[in-house]
């Protein structure tokens, strides 16, 4: 049985990871911590330079949308969870390393990651998973992609656009 579960969520909202972590926490009567690692210089930031976009503000707004969506799911499911945000350090550590370090620090029994969609050339989610597994001895569970309705995804996109305009 698990006593402490860490669910990593991100801009893809990792709904499968959060839903799976909630189910496992209920089964085990475990404490749940939700973690979002904020990239201060995301890969798409270079594309925004030409439009004179305020990238730090946009990154913070995206993090707020991720948090609000995750908290909405937790409320809907009637689950209490600790929420943590970590900024990606500038020392070269990756998102996967921050997730693993946080799980080790919190003494989590289980780390739940979203399976996600494959990125460009198959990179992305599998890289995060591999880094997490290399830097922790905790169990890692990869949640399968959620069959969330397209309306829910559209609502999230709309929420992000509203946050940008605010």
Image (tube, helix red, strand yellow):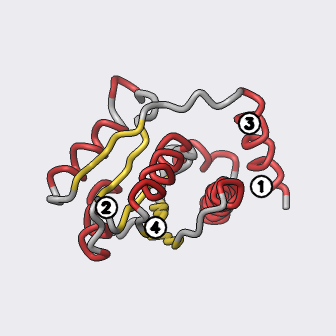
Give the residue at mark 4. Answer: 33
Viewer-nearest of discs 3 and 4: 4
The single residue placed furthest to the top in the displayed view is 121
Name the element at disc 4. strand
Name which of mark 3 and mark 4 comes first in the sequence. 4
Name the element at disc 3. helix
Name the element at disc 2. loop
Up/down of 133 relative to 60, above or below: above
One can see residue 129 in this view: yes
Give the residue at mark 1. Answer: 164
Residue 84 point in image, percent of width and height:
49, 72
Q: Nearer the viewer, residue 119 or 156?
A: 156
Query: Alpha-carbon neighbours of circle 1 within 10 Å: few (<14), some, or many (≥20)?
Result: some
Up/down of 52 relative to 104, above or below: above
Name which of mark 2 and mark 4 comes first in the sequence. 2
Task: Check if mark 3's residue and mark 1's residue have beta carbons within 8 Å.
Answer: no
Task: Check if mark 3's residue and mark 4's residue have beta carbons within 8 Å.
Answer: no
Q: Residue at x 30, y 67 (%)?
A: 108
| Label placed on residue 152 | 3
Residue 66 point in image, percent of width and height:
62, 55
| Label placed on residue 2 | 2
Viewer-nearest of discs 2 and 4: 2
Q: Nearer the viewer, residue 114 or 46?
A: 114
Q: Residue at x 64, y 31 (%)?
A: 148
Residue 17 point in image, percent of width and height:
46, 45
Query: Alpha-carbon neighbours of circle 2 within 10 Å: few (<14), some, or many (≥20)?
Result: some
Q: Residue at x 42, y 52 (%)?
A: 24
Viewer-nearest of discs 1 and 4: 4
Up/down of 44 relative to 79, above or below: above
Name which of mark 1 and mark 4 comes first in the sequence. 4
Up/down of 43 relative to 136, above or below: above
Query: Alpha-carbon neighbours of circle 3 within 10 Å: few (<14), some, or many (≥20)?
Result: few
């Amino acid at each position: 049985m698990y006593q402490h579960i860490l669910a990593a969520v991100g801009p893809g909202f990792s709904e499968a990871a959060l839903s799976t972590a909630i189910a496992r926490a209920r089964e085990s009567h475990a404490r749940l911590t939700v973690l979002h690692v904020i990239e201060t210089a995301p890969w798409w930031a270079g594309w925004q330079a030409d439009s004179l976009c305020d990238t730090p503000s946009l990154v913070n707004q995206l993090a707020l949308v991720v948090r609000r969506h995750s908290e909405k799911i937790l409320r809907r499911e009637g689950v209490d969870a600790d929420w943590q945000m970590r900024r990606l350090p500038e020392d070269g550590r990756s998102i996967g390393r921050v997730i693993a370090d946080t799980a080790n620090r919190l003494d989590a029994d289980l780390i739940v990651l979203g399976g996600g969609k494959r990125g460009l050339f198959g990179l992305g989610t599998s890289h995060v998973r591999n880094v997490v597994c290399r830097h922790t001895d905790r169990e890692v569970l990869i949640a399968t992609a959620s069959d969330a309705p397209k309306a829910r995804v559209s609502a999230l996109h709309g929420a992000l656009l509203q946050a940008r305009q605010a």
